[in-house]
Image (cartoon, rainbow, N blue to C red):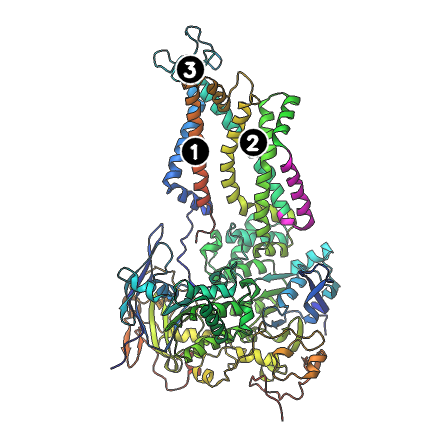
Amino acid sequence: MEPRPLFEIRDLVVEFSTARAIVRAVHGVSLEVARGECLAVVGESGSGKSQLFLGSLGLLAAGGVARGSVLFDGREVLGGDGAARREVLGTRLSFVFQDPMNTLTPHLAVGRQLAEVVLDRGLMGPDAARARSIQVLRSVRMPEPESRLRHYPHELSGGQRQRVAIAMALMTDPELLVADEPTTALDVTVQAQVIEVLREARDRGLALVLITHDLGVVAGIADRVAVMYAGRVVECAPVRELFAATAHPYTAALLATVPRLDAPPDRRLKGVEGQPPSPGADVPGCAFAPRCPRVVPRCWEERPALQSLGGRSVACHAPLPASAESGRSGGEEP
Amino acid sequence: MSVPMLQIRGLRVRFPVRGARLAATRRWLTAVDAVDLEVADGQAVGIVGESGCGKSTLARAILGLEAPADGSIEWRGTRVHRNDGAALRSLRREVQVVFQDPVGSLDPRMTVGESVTEALEALAGRQAGDAGAARVGATLEEVGLDPSLVKRYPHELSGGQCQRVAIARAIVARPKLLICDEAVSALDVSVQAQIVNLLDELRARHGMALLFISHNLAVVRHLCEEILVMYLGRVVERAPRESIFAAPRHPYTRALLAAVPVPDPVVAAARPRDPLRAASDSGLPSPMGCAFAPRCGAADDMCRSSIPPLEEVRAREFAACHHWRALAPSASPDSRRRAT
Amino acid sequence: MAGSTPASATTEGGLWGDAGQRLRSNRLVVAASIAIALLVVTALFGPWLSPWRLDQVDWSLNPLATAPSLSNAHWFGTDGNGRDLFVRVWQGTRVSLLVALLATAVSVVIGVAWGATAGYLGGRTDGWMMRFVDVLYALPYMFFVIILTVVFGRSLWLIFLAIGAVGWLTMARIVRGQALALRRREFVTAAVTLGLPAHRIISRHIVPNVLGTVIVYATLTVPQVILFESFLSFLGLGVQEPLTSLGRLVAEGALEMETAPWQLLVPAAVLATLLLALNFLGDGLRDALDPRQR
C-alpha cells in the first residue's frame, strides 16, 4: 500500500468569466505529488499549467473560479471555508511566482521581507527570524548572507532575486514548493544555479512542483513529468520513461524542439508547426489533432481519455510505440 | 576576400557610473572593451554571453544608439559616426534589429499593419498605398503569419506571433544585416525553434547577413557559422561553429556549454553538479587581470595580474586566456580540468 | 512568457471601440453621460421654449423678483431686475460650458505638445522646458488675470485665454511624466532605429500613448475651469452683462439668498449637477482607457 500522496488535485476545473464568454483554462485535471518527489508540469504558454496550480491554491485573478477537490496531506484545501487553505498556504506549502521583481517589494530590504514571512504568522521572534533568514539564504547559495539582508531588490541581479524569492518560500520549512517558471528570462548559467538550488532543497526532503515550458530544464531535476496541452494532461510518466520511451506525439514534438549540443548543427531545429489553441476553445476530438503527425480519423471525433498503464498515463489514440532505446531518438518521426 | 560589410575595430563603449561621492573622479563602466568584429555579406555571426557582457550595448552601438568612446564602426567600407546623420540613415536602411521583448517592441496603439507599414515608409521611402499594402501582406506571409492579422493589435497576439511581426517589420525593407538581440529568449522553447528556423529561411532566401545575440550557445549553434563569446565587455573566444563546440578553448566557453540544459535525464544525472558560480556572487575582477578570473577554476596569479590578449590558437580560432595551451581541448565542458 | 489569464480579442472598433464598450457597461458613467447630454441639449434649446428673452425685463411683476411659478411662464422665477431666470440659467450654462471647453482645448493642445516634447527629448532641453513651467506656476495667478482684465477689458475670449494659459501647465507636467516613461519602452527604440525624426516619433508614438491619460485629465479639468470661471465671476471679473454665466448667477443669487432663495438654488443646482456628472465621467474614462486591461 503506497503512502498517501502529499498533494493531490482531483478533477480540477478552472474557468474565467470574461466580458464575452466563460473561458475554461483547465478541464478536469488530476495530479498527485508524493513526499520528497519532484513533479515537473510541462506545457507551452496557454496550456493551463500555471492556472492549474493557481486555481488549486485559491490564487486566481479576479473573474477566475476553480472547482474540484484539492487535498494537502489528506485535508481538503480548495473547498470548505478556506481555513485549511490559509493554514497550509505559506507555511507547509509555498509558491514561487514567475517574475521575482514582482514578488519582492521594491522598497523593503531583503532581510525585512524574509523575516516578515515568519513574523507575521507569529511563528518565531525577531532574533530567531533573522537567524533563520541567514540560514535560508545560505541554503540558496547566496554568498555573504548577513550583508545581503540589508540590500534592496533593485540592488540584486536577476538570479539573486530569484534565489531570494525561493528563500522566502523556504522560510517556513515547507513540505511542498510550487515554482512557476523559475528559470524563464534568466541566463543559462543562472538557470543552472537556480535549478541546482532547487535540487539541493529537494535532496533535503522538500517535495517540488516545477512548472515550466522547457523540457531540457526538467531532465536534470524531475522525478516525474506531466505534460499538459490545451488545459488537459496528455502524458504523465517517470522522467526516464518519458524521455526514453515517449508515448504522446506532443511530448515527442516538444522534446524535438530543445536544441541539443549533440545533434548535428545543420539539421533544422524541429519546431511544432502551428499554434496551441487559445484557452477555452473546446473541440470534440483531441485538441492536438491539427498539429499531430500521427493523427488518425478517430482523433477528430473522440477525445482520447487519459489511460493509465503501469505507473504512467497517456491520452492518445495513436501513441508512439514503446521504444527500448534511450531518449536520444525519442523525438524522431517513425 | 571582399570587404566585409560590417567592420568593427577596437570598439569601446563606456557609461559613467553615478557614484554617491561627489568628490570622487568620474568612474566609468566599460560595457564594450576593445571589440573587433566582422560580418561578411550573407554571413551569420553569433555573439554569446551572459547579461552584462556588453552584447546588447554592442548592438546598440552598431545601430547608432550609443556613442562609442573609442574605435570605429565601418559599414561597406565607410566609417559611420553617430553624429553623421546621412551616414547613419543609410546604415539604418540596411541594418535592422529585432529585440528581445516581442510585445514591448511593438507600439500597443498601432495595428500590425501600421507598424510594418511605418517601417516600409521610413526605410524604403514613400510607397503608394496599394503597393505598400501588398508588400506588407507579402512580408507577413513570409514570416508565417496570416495576412488577415494586419488589423490586430499586439496584445491580441501571442509572444511568438508578436516576434514574427517584429521580424516582418525589420525585413520589410530588405535589410542587408539583421541584428537579433536575444530575439528568442523570451519565448517558449517550442516557439524558439520556429523562430530560429524562420530566421534561417529568411537568411537563405534574401541573402541577408545575421548578427545573432544570445545567452544560449545551443540556440546560436543552429544559426551561426562563426561565434564570438563575450565576457564583461571583451571577446574571450572567437571561432567557427564546429571548432567552438568540438574544442572550446576558453574556460568560460566551457562553462557556458556545461550550463546548457540537456533533455536527457541519464546524461543530466551524470553531469557534475557544481555549476559555475554566478557572476553576481563572485568578487569584482581586478582591472589589471583577466575579467573571468574570480569565477575561473583554473585562475592563478598571472591571470589576476595581466589581461590575456586574444591570441590566434589555430586558423580563424582565437582565445583570450593565458592557459589555453595547458587546458586540454575537449568537448566535455569542465572548467576546472587541467592537462597533466 | 507564461500563460496569463486569457486575453479577449478587441472589438471591431479597435482600441477605442473596446474602451467604448467598457464605458457603456459602467452604469454610473452612463447615468452621468445622460445627465450631461440632457443639460447640454436643454442649454442649447431650452431658451426657445420660453417666451422671455435674455435681457427682457418683465415690468408686469411687482416686486420685480418673483418666485418660480407656472402661471406667468417664469418657470425658474426672475432675478432682481425682473429678467426670466429660466432663460438666464441656460444661457449661463452655455457660456460656462463654452469657456470650459475652449479653455480645456487650449490647455490640452499646448500642454501635450510641450510635455511630450520635453519628456521625449529629455536631458537639458527637458530641464529648461520644465523650469519654464515651474516659473509660470509660481506666478500669482489671480494678479495675472486681474491685470489682463484691467488692460484688455472683460471679454469672453480673454477669459478662456487666461484660463487656458494657466491650465496647460499641469497638463504639461503630467504628459511629460508619461513621455519620460514611454521613452524607455522598446517600441520607441525600434522607431529610432527606423531612422524616424524626433517630431515623427513624438506625434506618432508618444502622443497616442498618452492620449488616454490626457482625455481623463481633460475631463476632470473641465469642472475645474467652470469653477474657476465662477470664481472670477463671483469676484466681478467674469463675463460682461448682458451675458451671464453660471458663476455670475450664483454670485448674484447668493446676495439675495434670504429673500429670494430660488435665485441661488436654481443655478447652483445646475452647476452642481454638471460638475458631478463630469467628475463621474472622468473617473469612468480613466478606468475604460487603462491600457493595462489584461
Q: Which residue is mark 3?
A: C259
Between discs 1 and 2, the one toward the N terminus: 2
Distance from Cα at disc 2 to Cα at disc 3:
35 Å
Q: How many marks?
A: 3
* Amino acid on which the number 3 mark rests in the picture: Thr
* Amino acid on which the number 1 mark rests in the picture: Leu
On the same chain: label 2 and label 3? yes
Residue B64 sits inside the magenta stretch:
no
Q: Nearer the viewer, mark 1 or mark 3?
A: 3
Q: Describe the element under mark 3 as helix, strand or loop.
A: loop
Instruction: Determine crowd level at label 2: few under 14, some 14-19, many 20+ residues with C-alpha closer than 10 A.
Output: many
Q: Describe the element under mark 2 as helix, strand or loop.
A: helix
| A62 relative to B2, above or below | above
Between discs 1 and 3, the one toward the N terminus: 3
> Residue C276's mark?
1
Residue A18 as seen in the image, left or right of residue C238: left
Q: Tell me residue A272's x, y (percent).
A: 43, 70
| B146 relative to A316, above or below | above
Q: Which residue is mark 2?
A: C103
* Amino acid on which the number 2 mark rests in the picture: Ala
> A27 or A301, which is in the foreground?
A27
Q: Tell me residue B316's x, y (percent).
A: 68, 80
Question: In the image, which residues are magenta?
Answer: C119-139
Residue B138 in view, yes or no: yes
Q: Chain of mark 3?
A: C
Residue B306: quarter of image: bottom right
Distance from Cα at disc 1 to Cα at disc 3:
28 Å
Q: Tell me residue C285's x, y (percent).
A: 45, 42
